[in-house]
Image: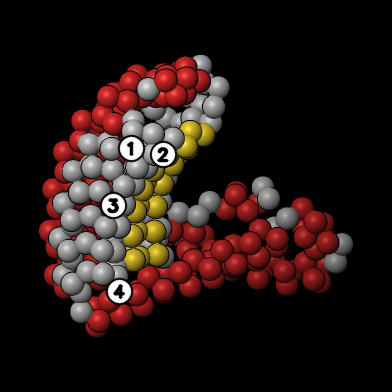
Amino acid sequence: MDKLSSCLKQIQNNEITKLVFSRNSVGDEGCVALRKALEINTSLIILSLSFNEIGDEGCVALGKALEINTSITKLRLSRNYINNTGCVALGKALEINSSLAILNLCSNEIGDVGCMALGKALEINTSLAILNLYNNEIGDVGCMALGKALEINTSLTALNISRNEIGDEGCAALEKALETNTSLTELYLSDNQIGKEKCDRVYQLTKRNEIRKENIATRTKLFASLFSPNAINNNNNNNNRNQEAVFFSRDFFNNCLFDINLIGFVVSTYLDQ
């Protein structure tokens, strides 16, 4: 606890942006202490607490902190003893939190109930991009909740649910979601109880999203270059070329905006580069 006490002071005083504190036996007691510091902290971006014997009580405390904290974007809680109760608390936090982008819960003891809470949160949450649930105890019911969420969610780009207890029924829910979902480009399903045909179909759908994103990103960058100040000045110096370029650009602009709106790209991110 001496090491943790020192870190707590740094967190409370907003002196650090990253805390990697793995293999330090933080436990539930340490997480309760962390909660108080995180609730007033505004600087910490990355928090890694893997291999720390954290159970549900500690995870609940961290969940409560995430309901208030707005700075943490990456949280790693892999290889602990987190069960459904702790995961439900994280789910509730994600319904409120809008800063967390990466959540790693691999190698815990999370089952369907915990996964259902995460699924419910993903129907609302718009910040989480990567969710790692590798090596837990999630079955078809939990996976179906994730599938339902993916029919709505547009922020999640990567999901790892390998080495769980998911069968064809759970995978079918993912397949159904991916018929309309355009944001998920990485989905890991190995070491479950899913037939090869189902796995192949889901893989094809995620691959389609990946290709689609690459194409849209390329088109959007081209769009930005067409409307850059240099391009506009060059067009103004040549009236004939200007007429042709403007005609093409307007058509391209309409197509680009349609695709950008579908997957949440913001044109200004490219224009500012």
Q: Earlier in the sequence, mark 4 or mark 1?
A: 1
Marks 1 and 2 sit apart, C-alpha to C-alpha, by: 6 Å
Q: Nearer the viewer, mark 3 or mark 4?
A: 3
Residue at label 3? 107
Residue at 16% across / 38% down in the picture?
Answer: 85
Left or right placement of residue 131 versus residue 84 in this view: right
Q: How is the image coloured?
A: secondary structure
Residue at label 4? 202
Q: Residue furthest right?
A: 237
Residue at label 1? 52
Q: Earlier in the sequence, mark 3 or mark 2?
A: 2
Residue type at the position of mark 4: Val
**Observer-nearest of 125 and 257:** 125
Residue type at the position of mark 1: Asn
Residue at label 2? 22
Label 1 CA crowd tier, 10 Å (few <14, some 14–19, many 20+): many
Residue 97 placed where, x, y %?
Answer: 34, 35
Marks 3 and 1 sit apart, C-alpha to C-alpha, by: 12 Å
Marks 3 and 4 sit apart, C-alpha to C-alpha, by: 23 Å
Mark 3–mark 1 CB contact (< 8 Å): no
Marks 4 and 1 sit apart, C-alpha to C-alpha, by: 35 Å
Mark 1–mark 2 CB contact (< 8 Å): yes
